[in-house]
Image (cartoon, coloured by chain):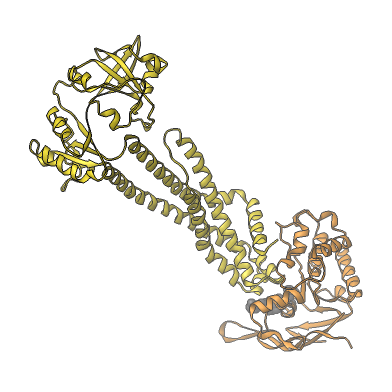
Chain colours: A yellow, B orange
């Protein structure tokens, strides 16, 4: 066996014989590592979740929203306070549709409704929107078809529903086509069922639970004839900046500058990202404190160990151990103790993450495994070196005479 | 002519006590141990026997005088070189056995091997087996020290002191923690080992024990008196 192997083995068997104390000592490291790993797993999962949400909606999108969300003077998302009342009207839709760079213009009127079919009733999110909603969001009809601009002009009471809702109401999506469902107190004919988009989770509504109806038909519910949001899809990525300016110019003719905003999906992502990095810094700082506290626990127990084992140190020196042999022995014990705590923290985090995964795509990356084990070894070395040095610096004669 | 294993020239060990008084644990000791000797260091408690043994065993350094091994004064060696020399030159046997309780008997016997820097011209594992067999403790090889008798523990300690094939065995009161019968058995074992040519130095305050060796070095108040 190699030299390192033999000290590690001896350190490990040592702790095997002192399980209770080993566990308690490494508890601090365990908690520290666990919080770091869980934070990283949740952060990574959140990133995946957000980008999945945006990817499922497609790229080159501009969101026209009420409120001064990202404008100067606005303070991030909180600037939207009080500005969330529906604001846009049909004239805006028509105006934006005329812009050269705009491919699709998708207005949204949203309402939570009760959808029922023969005794089965489900809550769903109703969207009054235009025929552009389908190509603009990459929504494809799995059964039947989506509605057209003619349906909109004629105010036809037709509905396109998400796959999940279709399954809940009809058991099988294909059975939904042509059936009449009741949306609140109105009867609508289902003409299409969309392919599943996934998403949702976190308790938020999923596209698969949405109902889409023509926005003019939706005036039965939307008596103010106002829309909460208009999403505009640019023809190409290069069109985005110009299109954004044009939208601003057009809408400014009717609405005050600080009452609406036009944002790109990347801006939203960046804002959410920066909020989470601030949160992460705070939480990582807390985790770092618990790691330091854990390290101090190791420092303490190693000092105790050294003073309990002065005679042993003397015996080992008498048998030919050098100063460094003693140093490495105690340093290895501190590192084993600390890495043991780290590994347990990692193990527990893995269990928690496994449990979280049923709600949320959290995952433990290789980086966080490396970070957890790396940090705990570093802590073992940093806090173990003082007691180990104390042990190594004992003179052989004082150690062997010690009773 | 027999070669000298170690010689001490005018070795003193002084301790500065409170009030500037100097206490001599050892005073001008001149001593020569030859290869194959079986000697006892005898003297009353506090006379300096252990101090002398620790200096011979390279665990302690004299404040004055020279310790010569193989024509070299080893007082000037640094800590690492002293440790290496100690590992190869001397094997210790203690009154309290000083085995490590968390290691098995076999691991205890092999412990010095882990600290050795030399190349072995024999297989240490085989030698450990041989020593355990010879000392009647082979069936205990996987036991732990606190599970065997005092006499057996001291045999383990002697096996450990022999594993490196050192030039000299130093035993500090090896029978001090044993009953008379077991103590006699241990002394018999030393006698046998000496007949095979191993140099042994036993520290004791009991004249009976000292008589069983072939040379008595009497020490009193830090001075060798005979
Ligand atoms: N570090 C020290 N500081 C001061 N005095 C010491 C120190 N170490 C040993 N002594 C003294 O040196 C003297 C010799 O000690 P030593 O242990 O060599 O005696 P000993 O002959 O082995 O006695 P015993 O038979 O009781 O073991 C004693 O008086 C002891 O108190
Ligand atoms: Mg003594």
In this rendering, does residue A297 appear at all? no
For the residue pair A368 and A197, the one nearer the viewer reads as: A197
For the residue pair B165 and A305, the one nearer the viewer reads as: B165
Q: Quadrant of residue A202?
A: top left
A260 displayed left or right of A104: left
B113 displayed left or right of B192: left
Name the quadrant of the C terminus of chain A: bottom right
Q: Quadrant of ligand 1?
A: bottom right
Name the quadrant of the N terminus of chain A: bottom right
Q: Is residue A387 above or below residue A50?
A: below
For the residue pair A368 and A38, the one nearer the viewer reads as: A368
Residue A72 at x, y = what percent? 16, 48
In this rendering, does residue A231 appear at all? yes
Residue visible at 42% across and 47% down in the picture? A40
Q: Is residue A208 above or below residue B3?
A: above
Residue B158 at x, y = what percent? 81, 67
Q: Is residue A6 above or below residue B70?
A: above
Residue B41 at x, y = what percent? 80, 79
Residue visible at 15% across and 48% down in the picture? A73
Residue B52 at x, y = what percent? 74, 80
């Amino acid at each position: 066996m190699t030299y390192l192997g033999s000290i590690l083995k001896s350190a490990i068997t040592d702790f095997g014989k002192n399980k209770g104390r080993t566990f308690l000592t490494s508890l601090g490291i365990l908690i520290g590592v666990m919080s770091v790993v869980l934070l990283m797993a949740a952060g990574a999962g959140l990133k995946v979740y957000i980008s999945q949400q945006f990817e499922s909606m497609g790229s080159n999108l501009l969101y026209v929203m009420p409120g001064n969300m990202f404008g100067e003077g606005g303070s991030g998302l909180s600037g939207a306070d009080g500005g969330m009342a529906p604001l846009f009207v049909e004239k805006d839709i028509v105006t934006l549709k005329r812009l050269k760079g705009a491919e699709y213009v998708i207005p949204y009127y949203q309402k939570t409704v009760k959808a029922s079919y023969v005794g089965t009733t489900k809550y769903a999110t109703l969207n009054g929107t235009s025929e552009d909603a389908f190509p603009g969001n990459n929504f494809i009809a799995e059964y039947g078809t989506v509605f057209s601009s003619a349906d909109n002009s004629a105010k036809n009471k037709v509905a396109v529903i998400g796959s999940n809702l279709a399954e809940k109401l009809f058991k099988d999506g294909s059975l939904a086509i042509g059936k009449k469902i009741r949306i609140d107190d109105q009867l609508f004919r289902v003409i299409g069922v969309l392919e599943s988009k996934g998403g949702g989770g976190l308790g938020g509504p999923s596209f698969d639970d949405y109902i889409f109806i023509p926005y003019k038909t939706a005036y039965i519910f939307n008596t103010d004839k106002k829309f909460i949001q208009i999403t505009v899809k640019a023809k190409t990525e290069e069109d985005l900046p110009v299109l954004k300016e044009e939208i601003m110019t057009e809408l400014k003719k009717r609405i005050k500058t600080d009452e609406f905003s036009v944002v790109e999906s990347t801006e939203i992502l960046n804002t959410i990202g920066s909020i989470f990095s601030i949160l992460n810094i705070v939480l990582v700082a807390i985790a770092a404190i618990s790691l330091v506290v854990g390290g101090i626990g190791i420092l303490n127990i190693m000092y105790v160990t050294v003073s309990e084992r002065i005679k042993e140190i003397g015996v080992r020196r008498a048998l030919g151990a050098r100063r460094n042999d003693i140093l490495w022995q105690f340093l290895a014990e501190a590192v084993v103790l600390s890495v043991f705590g780290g590994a347990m923290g990692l193990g527990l985090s893995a269990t928690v993450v496994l449990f979280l995964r049923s709600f949320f795509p959290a995952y433990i990356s290789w980086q966080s495994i490396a970070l957890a084990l790396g940090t705990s070894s570093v802590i073992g070395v940093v806090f173990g070196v003082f007691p180990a040095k104390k042990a190594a610096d004992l003179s052989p004669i004082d150690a062997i005479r010690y009773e | 002519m027999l070669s000298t294993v170690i010689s001490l020239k005018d070795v003193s060990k002084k301790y500065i006590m409170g009030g500037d008084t100097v206490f001599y644990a050892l005073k001008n000791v001149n001593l020569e141990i030859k290869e194959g000797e079986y000697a006892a260091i005898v003297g009353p408690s506090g006379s300096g026997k252990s101090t002398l043994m620790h200096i011979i065993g390279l665990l302690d350094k004299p404040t004055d005088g020279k310790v010569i091994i193989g024509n070299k004064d080893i007082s000037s060696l640094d800590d690492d070189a002293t440790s290496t020399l100690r590992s190869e030159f001397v094997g210790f046997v203690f009154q309290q056995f000083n085995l490590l309780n968390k290691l098995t008997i076999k691991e205890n016997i092999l412990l010095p091997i882990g600290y050795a820097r030399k190349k072995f011209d024999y297989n240490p594992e085989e030698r450990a087996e041989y020593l355990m067999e010879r000392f009647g403790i082979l069936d205990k090889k996987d036991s732990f020290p606190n599970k065997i008798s005092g006499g057996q523990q001291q045999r383990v300690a002697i096996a450990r002191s022999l594993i490196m094939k050192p030039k000299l065995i130093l035993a500090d009161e090896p029978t001090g923690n044993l009953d008379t019968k077991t103590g006699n058995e241990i002394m018999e074992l030393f006698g046998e080992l000496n007949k095979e040519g191993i140099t042994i130095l036993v520290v004791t305050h009991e004249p009976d024990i000292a008589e069983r060796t072939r040379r008595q070095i009497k020490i009193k108040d830090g001075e060798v008196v005979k």
